Amino acid sequence: MVDKIIQGKTRTRRQFCSFYTESDPILTYMIKNLDIRDGDIILEPCAGDGDFIEKIIASTENSYKIDALDFNPVAVEKLRQRFHTGFVSVRHADTLLDPTLDLFANCNGYYTKIIGNPPYGAWQDYDKRNLLKKIYGGYVRETYSLFIKRCIDLLKKDGILVFIVPDTFLALHLHKETREKILKDTIIKEILLIPSSFFPKVNFGYSNLCIITLQKNGIIKDNKIKIISVLDDISNLYEIAKRNLSVASSFEEIDQKEVIKSLDMAFLIGGDQKIRNFVNEPDVRLGDIADCVTGFYSGDNKKFLAVTDCDIKNAKHYTIIDKSLIEDKYLQQPKIIEGLNDEKKYIPILKGGNGCFTKETEWYILWDSKTVVFYRSDQKARFQNSQFYFKEGIGVPMVRGNHLHAFLLEKRLFDQSIVGIFPKDNKYFNYILAFLNSEVCSKMMKAINHTANNSANYLKKLPLIISDNIITEIDDIMNYYFITRDKNSTLERINTFFNGLYKV
């Protein structure tokens, strides 16, 4: 049977999303943290090719039992061929829906230890997705978080879980329910942060990986969560496993109670204690003084977007149009939101990519009235937040680089790769534009969400120190920029001002 292609991957690849754990430093660290004892009943809920099991057998002489489950029948057959010992039981099962595991979960757990590398982003058909949502609630499209919830319930009291997963659950809105369960039902013993490139055959663009070690229940009151990062050499995990933290890139202990009380129960691992205090206890947030919204999407950019120059970055395979087709005076059209009605068919649109204070127009979009009707009705298109189209605002790229940057929208349409920020009072305009380009803002944003995502919901959380005197000083700095267009000097003045104000 031909394997169906789903989101650029075969159905099999999307369904199982298995990234097997072939790294010995990772295996060594995880099994050391599992702390296997005589009599342990160990679960490997997504056993794959059995690397965890093999390492457990090779590294400990304790007496224990292992249940190895996998949803992929091919993997199950290979596991049965690989492990013939009586203390390893291999079973074909869907860990998230298996009825035997339901019984264990409903009886306050069964396993004393759980170790695994759950699937990341495994594809589910819509019927199964709806079923998982009824059972687990919250966000079900990212399967690793469901495995965390499920396996916490499968642990006995004082049982230990060690998982390697993407680090997105530490901050993203979609994983708030997962964070709440982890924080309230377990003691978080340790979180080890590593680049995804450390993991064989994996390199995520949107996040890195973490290895989380949890203990079921216990006294959360005084628990300090160890946050360790190893960024430069994977072999340092051998030393970390021996508790030699001197080789770590960074090490910090955070009170678990503090995380429970933090904004959205996020770990805010991208900042220090002072930054976390700013984020959690601000007088004003950006969302209080400005609307932060996601932009437009055509549904098929290759069809509707165009450029006038083939040398524009990422413009390969896009239409190249004659400038005579562009309506430069689109703002003079009384009903531009409904589209153009003359021979000119295109208007400017801003796409993602950095710009500091200002951003040139490089892209254009088909905007005749007939096509606008299509945008409004097509299921793939997103004619969202249209009340902000063609308004003066500030744009921030959805994907963050090393530093946050912001630019004037100048009443151009902006697409969904940009967050549009629209001050509720014009007196805040220069302040917001300056702050979003400051070093301080980048530090705050990294704490709020350490991944590369700058979505509107995270930008709204930015803590602001603001007063009439501050606004006046920033107005002077930004007026200097608009007169001189000296970006570097303006950034230097902005950073000096906000560094002195925040002192972080």
Image: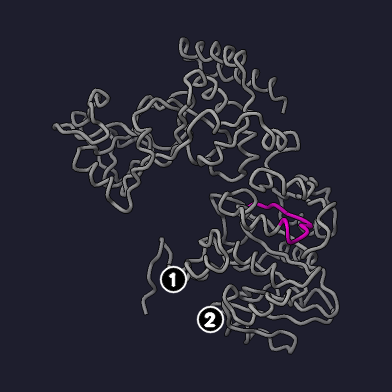
Q: How is the image coloured?
A: one colour
Name the image quarter holding residue 490: top right
Q: Which mark is residue 127?
A: 1
What is the chief secondary structure element of the magenta stretch?
strand
Residue drawn at (48%, 40%) of the image: 398
Estimate the spatial distance between the alpha carbons at disc 1 and disc 2, rounded to whole Å.
Answer: 24 Å
Residue 14 can be seen, yes or no: no
Q: Position of residue 451 (x, y in %)?
A: 59, 46
- Residue placed at 55% from the left, 36% from the top? 460
Identity of the residue furthest to the left in this view: 343
Q: Quadrant of residue 84?
A: bottom right
Query: Residue 371 vs residue 387: left or right?
Result: left
Q: Which residue is mark 2?
A: 74
Q: Quadrant of residue 473?
A: top right
Location of residue 90 with respect to 489 vertically, above or below: below
Say which label, 1 or 2, has the lower sequence index: 2
Q: In this rendering, which labeled residue sits more in front, label 1 or label 2?
A: 1
Q: Amino acid at mark 2?
A: Val
Where disc 2 sits, the SS reads helix
Q: Is residue 303 left or right of residue 77?
A: left
Magenta stretch containing residue 185, yes or no?
yes
Considering only vertical position in the picture, is 471 above or below 224?
above
Q: Is residue 470 above or below residue 353?
A: above
Residue at (53%, 81%) from the top-left corner?
A: 74
Tell me residue 317's x, y (percent): 30, 46
Q: Residues within 10 Å of mark 1 (few under 14, many from 20)?
A: few
Q: Which residues are magenta?
A: 183-195
Q: Compare residues 341 and 326 and report the one nearer the observer.
A: 341
Q: Which mark is residue 255?
A: none
Who is closer to the viewer here, 189 or 492? Answer: 189
* Residue 229 spot, x, y in % from top left: 73, 49
